[in-house]
């Protein structure tokens, strides 16, 4: 049917999925690869010399252009007021710095960029990323580092002998220009090695596993029980269905905050009721003890996701033909035999799919813990995602944090592969439809 | 269908308890939202009867905090994410469900794998990219990363829906001389609308509820979304429970209405991908 100039169905197919695949590749897959790459580097967002990946020695030209004149001006000013040998010493330092500048400028690139950036800065214009960094050879780096160290040492000696007008300025100007010098921050697998023996990581991992196994098991058992119970005719099915959806639809952080209120040590009704029925000696201990906090987190998760689990399993139950039960009834099978011989086997793939998604969600848990306990008390509810978040955004250590994030990714991949091995190709369901 | 079991009084009692357990946190938080500060704490904390009910907490959320701004930000980000993800995903899902080409299971496998990615594993490069492009504290700064979950979710659900549309209709249109484009726009999309709509609801809820990207990328007060805004209500030493409760209720009520109106669709959307038929 293809006419000239129009696309065949096959070509059209590729054309239609191309945008989606391209976007997924760029926005989801590339970042994971990049995360891994970052985890091999000492990237710290609160340190200007390390806030990016640097493969080679280099010079942050913007910083260099900004700070070099300051240093020269400082030395000039001090030399003007100094006398005799001190004056000579200061002028000597200035000469040393100027020589360093000229040697660095010999490569041509540094000198040319210097002019360009100087003009941009004078015009108060931002410096484009591609102009910002210049690669340095190891000799250039050594020259710059040694010169700056010598000058710093000499200045500090003079400051100690009270020979400087503004001794407090010396350290500042030297540090300013030193931070323009960039060293490669590749660390290889150092962070992964470090985490092998990191007690906090193993604690976070075991918290995560404990949370995942306990909450998902409870959700499965309760969800299956509820699904079996409501698998019959009754009035108000719509109401139940809507009610079941509400905890699922509410943002996790909001449900976490609601539970935090209910668990509160002074005013929380749930904590109060637990104390009344003897589950707790003192309602204040619910969120302040290790066991209490873990229980609280699991309880809140079970409340939020059991209804959802029940919904998935209920849908699975409805696909089991009634005739199977009728035949079993005729053959004299008991209710429990029917459950173990018919319901469970036929529900297996529904259960596994529900378990897969719930296990992954539980393993990645972040929102609930962040809002409810913040990982406390004493890191007792800190999961691995929370640990990674804190390393990245509280300590600003992105290299380290990315290593943790990649560990999460690796665990999630292992869990998925495990489930998919059991489920087989059923999940993708090519056999269905076309 | 195993519908022959009839429900007895015990069953309805069980349903009532079940409903109560599910709804209890909402009811208690609603109560707290209506209480004046002196009844929220101390001796009155556990009382069900409010002596002086007040709407102060609801008013304060809007007057003393930029909750209106949060709501607007969340609405904009979730709506744009939904529109963009659904558009791109519709084409992809149409191709996977209706057009013959090789490598479909690879495409679907990849989509499924990406939907399992932990967000934390993508956050560091995305954050650094947004920062270097000056996109932190902007709508685009959230819409772009939201692709990581919105697009796989949309493609997966739409493919399941589209596969249920009888392919014969497409074949018939082709015999009648319709082009692929005409088949898609005239025959296919009208039939696909219910599935598209259901998927849109699911994507919207997911984008509305997202927390980690919103927490890290949009940190300015004027650009925060609802979940981040509410979490940040808490001070270092104080918990304004009245206001948190009121804000929670304000967010929950529209969701409850949405869920009540579209429950059938949502349930079919949630379960169709997971149940073999």
Image (cartoon, coloured by chain):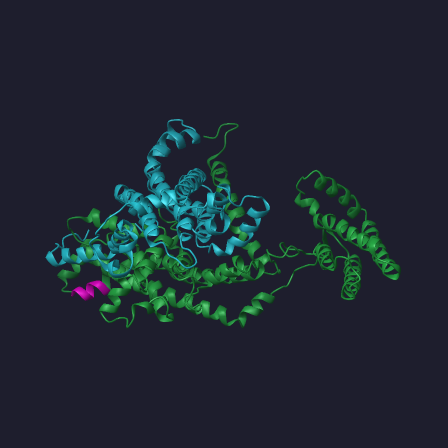
- Residue drawn 43% across the image and 31% down it: B180
- Chain in cyan colour: B
User: Which quarter of the figure is the N terminus of chain A placed in?
Assistant: top left
Q: Position of residue B60 (x, y in %)?
A: 35, 45
Q: Nearer the viewer, residue B110 or A94?
A: A94
User: Can residue A238 be spotted in the picture?
Assistant: yes
Q: Nearer the viewer, residue A209 or B58?
A: B58
Q: Position of residue A154 (x, y in %)?
A: 80, 63
Q: Position of residue A331 (x, y in %)?
A: 14, 63
Which stretch appears magenta? A334-340
Queried whether the magenta region covers residue A414, the answer comes back as no
Query: In screen coordinates, is A79 left or right of A117?
Result: right
- Residue drawn 35% across the image and 52% down it: A254
Q: Name the residue at the left extreme.
A: B9
Q: Is residue A362 above or below residue A122?
A: below
Instruction: Place residue A187 in its image quadrant.
Output: bottom right
Task: Identify the main secondary structure in magenta.
Answer: helix
Q: Nearer the viewer, residue A394 or B258?
A: A394
Number of marks in picture: 0
Instruction: Place residue A434 in its image quadrant.
Output: top left
User: Can residue A434 be spotted in the picture?
Assistant: no
- Chain in green colour: A
- Residue drawn 62% across the image and 55% down it: A51
Query: In screen coordinates, is A348 left or right of B111?
Result: left
Q: Position of residue A99 (x, y in %)?
A: 85, 54
Instruction: Place residue B160 in its image quadrant.
Output: top left
Query: In screen coordinates, is B190 left or right of A337?
Result: right
């Amino acid at each position: 049917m293809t006419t000239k100039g129009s696309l065949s169905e096959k070509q059209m197919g590729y054309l239609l999925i191309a945008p989606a695949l391209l976007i997924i590749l760029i926005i989801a897959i590339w970042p994971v690869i990049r995360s891994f790459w970052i985890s091999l580097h000492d990237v710290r967002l609160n340190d200007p010399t390390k806030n990016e990946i640097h493969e080679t020695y280099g010079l942050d030209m913007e910083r260099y252009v900004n700070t070099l004149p300051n240093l020269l001006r400082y030395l000039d000013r001090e030399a003007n007021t100094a006398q005799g040998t001190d004056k000579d010493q200061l002028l000597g330092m200035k000469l040393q710095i100027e020589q360093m500048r000229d040697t660095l400028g010999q490569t041509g690139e540094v000198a040319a960029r210097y002019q360009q950036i100087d003009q941009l800065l004078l015009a108060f214009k931002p410096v484009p990323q591609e102009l910002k960094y210049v690669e340095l050879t190891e000799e250039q780096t050594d020259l710059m580092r040694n010169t700056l160290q010598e000058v710093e040492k000499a200045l500090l000696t003079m400051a100690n002998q009270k020979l400087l007008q503004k001794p407090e300025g010396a350290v500042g100007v030297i540090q300013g220009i030193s931070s323009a010098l960039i060293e490669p921050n590749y660390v290889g697998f150092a962070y992964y090695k470090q985490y092998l023996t990191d007690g906090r990581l193993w604690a976070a991992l075991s918290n995560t596993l404990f949370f995942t196994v306990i909450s998902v098991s409870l959700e499965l058992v309760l969800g299956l029980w509820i699904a079996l119970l409501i698998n019959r005719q009754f009035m108000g099915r719509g109401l139940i269905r809507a009610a079941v959806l509400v905890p699922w639809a509410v943002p996790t952080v909001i449900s976490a905050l609601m539970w935090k209120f209910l668990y509160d040590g002074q005013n929380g009704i749930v904590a109060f009721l637990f104390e009344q029925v003897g589950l707790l000696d003192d309602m204040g201990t619910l969120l302040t003890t290790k066991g209490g906090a873990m229980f609280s987190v699991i309880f809140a998760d079970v409340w939020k996701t059991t209804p959802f689990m029940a919904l998935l399993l209920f849908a699975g139950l409805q696909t089991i033909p009634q005739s199977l039960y009728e035949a079993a009834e005729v053959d004299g099978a008991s209710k429990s035999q029917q459950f173990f011989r018919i319901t469970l086997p036929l529900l297996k793939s529904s259960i596994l799919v529900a378990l897969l998604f719930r296990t992954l969600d539980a393993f990645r848990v972040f929102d609930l813990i962040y809002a409810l306990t913040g990982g406390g008390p004493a890191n007792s509810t800190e999961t691995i995602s929370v640990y990674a978040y804190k390393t990245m955004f509280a300590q600003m250590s992105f290299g380290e944090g990315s290593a943790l994030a990649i560990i999460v990714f690796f665990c999630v991949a292992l869990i998925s592969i495990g489930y998919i091995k059991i489920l087989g190709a059923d999940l993708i369901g090519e056999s269905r439809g076309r | 269908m195993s519908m022959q079991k009839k429900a007895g009084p015990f069953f309805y009692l069980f349903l009532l308890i079940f409903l109560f357990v599910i709804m209890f946190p909402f009811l208690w938080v609603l109560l707290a939202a209506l209480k004046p500060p002196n009844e929220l704490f101390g001796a009155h904390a556990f009382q069900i009867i409010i002596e002086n009910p007040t709407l102060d907490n609801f008013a304060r959320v809007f007057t003393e905090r930029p909750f209106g701004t949060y709501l607007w930000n969340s609405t904009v980000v979730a709506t744009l994410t939904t529109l963009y993800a659904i558009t791109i995903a519709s084409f992809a899902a149409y191709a996977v469900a209706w057009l013959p080409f090789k490598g479909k299971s690879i495409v679907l496998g990849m989509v499924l794998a990406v939907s399992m990615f932990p967000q934390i594993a993508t956050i560091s490069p995305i954050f650094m990219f947004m920062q270097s492009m000056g996109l932190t504290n902007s709508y685009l700064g959230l819409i772009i990363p939201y692709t990581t979950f919105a697009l796989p979710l949309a493609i997966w659900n739409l493919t399941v829906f589209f596969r249920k549309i009888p392919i014969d209709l497409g074949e018939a249109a082709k015999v009648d001389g319709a082009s692929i484009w005409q088949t898609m726009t005239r025959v296919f999309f009208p039939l696909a609308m219910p599935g598209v709509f259901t998927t849109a609801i699911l994507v919207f809820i997911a984008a509305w509820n997202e927390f980690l990207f919103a927490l890290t990328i949009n940190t300015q007060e004027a650009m925060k979304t609802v979940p981040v805004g509410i979490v940040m209500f808490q001070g270092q030493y104080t918990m304004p429970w009245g206001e948190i409760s009121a804000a929670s209720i304000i967010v929950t009520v529209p969701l409850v209405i949405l869920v009540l109106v579209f429950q059938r669709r949502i349930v079919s959307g949630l379960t169709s991908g997971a149940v073999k038929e």
